[in-house]
Image (cartoon, rainbow, N blue to C red):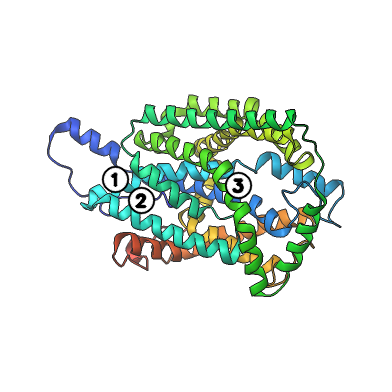
Amino acid sequence: MRARTHAEDPSHPLPAAGQRQERHQEQRQPASGTRLAQVDALRSFALLGILMVNITYMASAYHGSGLEDPGLGGPVSETVRRLVAVFFEAKFFLLFSFLFGYSFTLQMDSADRCGARFTPRFLRRLTGLFAFGVVHAVVLFPGDILTLYAVLGLVLLALRGLRPRTAVRVAVVLLVVTAVAYALLALGVGLTGGDDSIPPSTAAAAAQTTEALRGGPASVIGAHLRDLPDMAFVLVFFQAPSAFAAFLLGLAAGRHRALADADRHQRLLRRLQWAGLTVGLPGALVYADASLNHAGSAYHLFAVSVDVITAPLLAAAYAATVLRLVHDRHGRGVVAALAPAGRMSLTNYLGQSLVCALLFTGFGAALIGRVAPLGVAAIALALFAAQTVASHWWLRRHAYGPLEWLLRAWTTLSVPPWRVRDEIRPPRP
């Protein structure tokens, strides 16, 4: 999941094969300094968005059911729910998935520079992610995405030879086919007389889950295990097609080192921002209205169809905005502040779930169903801010995040450096 791979020795001589080959080799080298910080900052920004969504599911068993959590209604709560649905839901996992595909190309280059076989390395990495994901899903949060990435990563590995243009075309076709499938499903539900009514069993199930998650560890894990089939259905039929399309777009961008050379793509970045506002944002409004007020209806399925096409545009607009911040003096400070949390994305992703489990389940304070949406959003922002500060502190002393170190050790079958040597320690911001 970590895109920040770089040459251990930038001064290592290039093959003596002429100026043209030298330029080609330089293009294959991952960027350093500010350009690497852009990739890390994007991943950090994606982590914030994922946290804003995941915490809503951990704070209330009613979220996603179309029902309000008893005692947590009112205009302020409704406004917060709508803002999260419009600007965060189904957007940031796409950005995270894009960066997974982008980092895939950097990992291939890293293995090539080290003279290592890439396929065994990447397969070990996927098994490591899958193992982390299984523990995460069972113990902390059943809405895990690491297991999905591990499975889809096998397909990405098989298709790594795709040319960038072909990868983009396959991604677009995949999104269109998925959108059409949901539109046809919406039509079928509409023709069979489906309505907006929510079965009484939905409220009973949410109340039962709430009580189970307030219980002891065995009760919490039992609730997670019962939720896994529903979560797996959402992952396979909603997130998987869009995530893999984002993988392919990231693969294509990585082939061209698009994020390392963002300066050359300012016109494209502006166009992506415009597309996100004019197409992506209206699509997000439709999706939010349907998911909050018409869950399970034909309209909801149609809104999902719209979201499959429009959400990537809004996610791309977010990414374009972060990349353009580098051209602003204050924006460069924002990028530098975000980057360390992105370098420790695996640790921070699982750390977010751990903290939320301690807050909202019987592992700790058991606050599920007891914190209003505004308070939940405030907790998410405070947690991300704390992780950002902690990541700065940790990476001034250590070469990798703790879980990144474990994953790298398993991936490379070696012992990576643990501490940062004084002579290469980055300057204080």
Task: Tell which tag, 1 or 3, sits nearer the viewer.
Answer: 3
Looking at the picture, tell me which residue is in the foreground, 235 or 405.
235
Q: Residue at x 64, y 29 (%)?
A: 183
Image coordinates of residue 373 in percent, x first then y, are 77, 53
Q: Secondary structure at mark 2?
A: loop
Callout 3, which amino acid?
A: Val
Q: What residue occupies the far front of the structure in this picture? A: 192
Q: Is residue 222 above or below residue 71?
A: below
Disc 3 crowd, CA 10 A, few/some/many (<14, 14-19, 20+): few
35 sits left or right of 305 in the view? left
The nearer-to-camera label among 1 and 2 is 1
Density class for disc 2 (Cα within 10 Å; few <14, some 14-19, many ≥20) is many
Q: Please state the horizontal and vertical placement of residue 407, each as a whole percent of the image.
A: 39, 62
Q: CA distance from mark 1 to mark 3?
A: 34 Å
Q: Choose top left, top right, bottom left or bottom right for residue 90.
A: top right
Q: Residue at horizontal 42%, vertical 42%?
A: 101
User: Which callout, 2 or 3, points at the residue further toward the start of the chain?
Assistant: 2
Which of the numbered marks, if any, corresponds to residue 234? 3
Of the image marks 1 and 2, the number of the one nearer the N terminus:
2
Mark 1 sits on what residue?
Answer: 109
Verify CB contact (< 8 Å) between mark 1 and mark 2: yes
Q: Amino acid at mark 1?
A: Asp
Say left or right for 204 vs 263. Answer: right
Residue 304, disc: none
Residue 15 pos. (x, y %): 15, 42
* Residue pointed to by mark 2: 5
